[in-house]
Image (cartoon, rainbow, N blue to C red):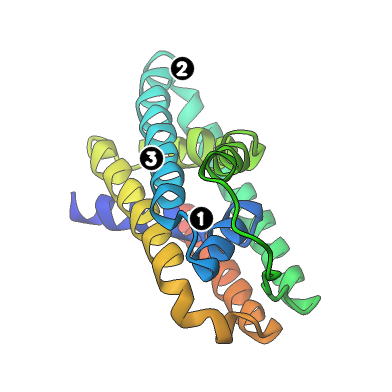
Amino acid sequence: MIEALLAGYLVSISLIAAIGAQNAFVLRQGIRREHVGWVVLVCAASDAVLIAVGVAGFGAASKSMPWLGEAMLWAGVAFLLVYGALRFRAAWQGGAALVPTATAPVAWGRVIATALLLTWANPHVYLDTLVLIGAISAQYAPFGVAFGAGAIAASGSFFVALGYGTRLLAPLMARPRSWVVLEVAVGSLMWAIAAALVFG
């Protein structure tokens, strides 16, 4: 069970840590110190719901279709390899520094609406949570719930650290090289997880 919990945490953190519009928005709000708690809550709660549905739904589907687990395992491996390669390509291209512009404060409702849009309108979030995390959780049966709990814990801790820790990292994350290091770390972790799935 501990192994499943840790695996869920690592898989989830590797997917969430990939730089995207949602994370850039959370970083920006953290640096601006603007509605940070609400943004973190929206992102973490949304992920928790999607991960829970992915783990529960995939487990139910795999019982009626025994071949689904094997098929999704290899689909998950392929996704991790490709997405890891994209992270390495982003690192090769030099990263993307986050330097928020000094603009006027944004209304609470608009910030929350943006956070919801960047979460629920992002096709990658469904691929990551419903498909990939759901598929990998089946490999840890009968501890799929522990895997899901680890994935949810990773999401929550990541967004809290991202939202509230960013103000300390703002000078560092303004440097493109810092993003390069992050991209390489995420890509390496994704490939390591893919290798672990293939070789057991």
Q: Residue at x 46, y 31 (%)?
A: 69
Rendered view: 103 above or below 73: below
Whether residue 166 appears in this view of the structure is: yes
Q: Earlier in the sequence, mark 1 or mark 3?
A: 1
The quadrant where residue 51 appears = top left
Q: Residues within 10 Å of mark 1 (few under 14, many from 20)?
A: many
| Circle 3 residue | 45
Which mark's residue is nearer the viewer, 2 or 3? 3
In the rendered structure, which amino acid carries the disc numbered 3?
Ala
Residue lying furthest front:
104
Relative image position of residue 198 (x, y in whole percent): 50, 54
Q: Residues within 10 Å of mark 2 (few under 14, many from 20)?
A: few
Q: Earlier in the sequence, mark 1 or mark 2?
A: 1
Which mark's residue is nearer the viewer, 1 or 2? 1
Whether residue 200 appears in this view of the structure is: no
Of residues 114 and 20, the one drawn nearer to the viewer in this rendering: 114
| Circle 1 residue | 16
Q: Where residue 163 is drawn, which disc sits there?
A: none
In the rendered structure, which amino acid carries the disc numbered 1?
Ile
Residue lying furthest top:
64
**In the rendered image, which quarter contains the C terminus?**
bottom left
Q: Quick one: SS at disc 1?
A: helix
State left or right for residue 191 relative to residue 5.
Answer: right
| Circle 2 residue | 65
Rendered view: 193 above or below 49: below
In the rendered structure, which amino acid carries the disc numbered 2?
Met
Relative image position of residue 45 (x, y in whole percent): 38, 40
Q: Residue at x 64, y 77 (%)?
A: 179
